[in-house]
Image (spheres, grey):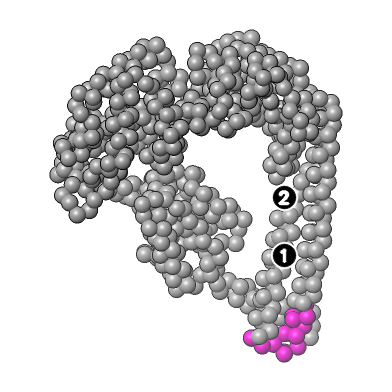
Amino acid sequence: MTAGARKARRAAAARKSDQGARARPKAVIYARYSSEKQNEMSVQDQLSHCRGAADRAGFEVVETYCDHASSGRTLLRSRPGILQMKDHIARGGVDALFVEGLERIGRRAADVVTTADWFEHRQVDLYSANAGRVDWKMVPFYAGIADIQAREIGEKTRRGQAGTTARGRVAAGVAYGYRVVHDKDLNREIDPQQAKVVRRVFEEYAAGLSPRAIAARLNAEGVLSPRGGQWNDSTIRGNAKKRDGMLRNEAYIGVIVYGRNQFTRDPDTGNRISRPADDDRIVHRERPELQIIGDDLWNEVQNRLEATYKRHAKAEPDRRSLNGAHRAKYLLARLITCDCCGAGYTIVGKERYGCYGRKTRGASACSNSKTISRFRLEERVVARLRQGLLTPELATHFAAEVQRFWQNEEAEARQQDQSLEADLAKVKKAIERLLDLLESDAGSDALLGRLRAKEEEARRLEAAIAARDAEALSTTSLDPGDLEAVYERLLRRLNSFLSAPEQVVLANELLGDLIAEIRVRPDEVARDGLAVEIHGDLARMVCAGSEYEKGAPQGALPYLSQISVVAGAGFEPATFRL
């Protein structure tokens, strides 16, 4: 046989092989159900329906992805199942996506538009188990319709629940002090044991106790909260604007209320936001059978709540604004943790830090009653930062650990590459032998099948080798002196922020780069009776220095983040007291 004929025979066999390899294109399935109240079997039903559709369409399902209790209006970037599926598709080898219905992807038109472009760009076809193949260009239109339907469903649900309330039945959840009954006109009845706790809370608050003190007493006595855990002062007090919390629940005076708050989703974050509803949308219905608290006691409690709210609103007006509530007001905000219970250390009195768990749940939640002046704690922490968390010994040790990690990764990658290349060489030899058999007219369907399988294996090995090359780690070294320079630069920036009180927000953010956590606990021999321990994260510090962010190999930083340092103690577990 001439060389030209041999080449033509091989090309023909390769074409047949390619046709066979494409006989079963690959597909993934995505399923979602909307609410925790829905049956989780809904996902299994969707997957089963999609598998049947994929099989009928000639696809091989290689993976399934799910999001549980996730609304269709939740941002796609906030859904783990969607993100995992996109990672898989980005690696290649997926030809189609199957969903039960297009609304499973999402009901936010603006969000779905970007997603449709992403999938279409990667040449992944979309199939609905209910409607067959769908052009991605049509998906935004379907999503717009689904968006409108979702809003209509929400409004119909609200209307139905408002009607239920108007007819004298409770449409919302089960409030503390009541239990569900199904055989009566009224679907709630008073729970005698919980009703005693409700009366006690109202009576103690009317007598002058604070919600915090009441919660501490209940926790100390082992009384379970509405959620079955410990009581919190906010459970009792609630929110004045939203009219929630135990002390503001009108069911306790025999009035069912529905629609006090309305819920929307932030278009930027997808988070569900609650706001007080207009009065004309709130439904009231009197049901004297549910009354637990007398009118006089109720009025006394409401008068005190209103007076307390007005007093605090006048004293701290800036806390009522969204900006004032979420931006750091103090240098160490959100960085301090109680080492006794794990709760945050926050401002609990006039310019004093204390355990938030102790403050809100009482001594039964945390034994740490020690507080410290905000100025004293800030002074101790800043002094230690200026003294230097990064000693020369620690910088040398950290740089050596980084270098050792990179070398180990390189050695492991070389071994894997050698193994993959050896396997590929064996497969290619097998392909040559099969082609020789086909050229000798001894070909058969069985031989073609073996050839297709070997060529598919060769493509898989070549893709694995290419992926390893793409993920190869850089061998850039990390010099200890450079680490110290990074720390000094960050410290200079911090000093410039500390010199200007209006820069407290920037100073707090920068401290988050220098300090992973500040742990405090009572200690009689420590300064101010409080032991303070700073924990830093050198990997975070390196990233904050920015010039090493590009030099560090992808995948190394999670490893580096495990190297945590206690201030003044290097890698030793000893505690350094400020």
Residue at 57% x, 25% y: name it: 368
Q: Is-magenta flag for residue 155?
A: no
Q: Out of 261 and 286, give the one closest to the viewer.
A: 286
Horizontally, residue 417 falls left or right of residue 34, namely right
Q: Position of residue 381 (x, y in %)?
A: 67, 18
Q: Position of residue 194 (x, y in %)?
A: 31, 39
Q: Out of 39 and 327, give the one closest to the viewer.
A: 39
For residue 461, the mark is 1
As helix, strand or loop, the secondary structure at mark 2 comes to loop
How many neighbours does mark 1 have within 10 angstroms: few (below 14), some (14-19), or many (20 or more)? some
Q: Can residue 412 be seen in this snapshot?
A: yes
Residue type at numbered disc 1? Leu
Residue at 24% x, 50% y: name it: 181
Q: Position of residue 150 (x, y in %)?
A: 31, 47
> In the rendered view, would you say 458 is above or below 157?
below
Residue at 37% x, 21% y: name it: 209
- Quarter holding the C terminus is top right
Q: Can residue 334 be seen in this snapshot?
A: no
Residue type at numbered disc 2? Glu
> In the rendered view, would you say 468 is above or below 156?
below
Magenta part of the chain: 432-445
Horizontally, residue 560 falls left or right of residue 260, namely right
Query: For the view shown, which residue lies furthest in the front direction?
Result: 221
Determine which quarter of the picture holds residue 133: bottom left
For residue 7, the mark is none
Query: For the view shown, which residue lies furthest in the bottom direction?
Result: 442
Determine which quarter of the picture holds residue 392: top right
Q: Out of 364 and 388, give the one closest to the viewer.
A: 364
For residue 471, the mark is 2
Q: Distance of mark 1 from mark 2, alpha carbons?
A: 15 Å
As helix, strand or loop, the secondary structure at mark 1 comes to helix
Determine which quarter of the picture holds residue 75: top left
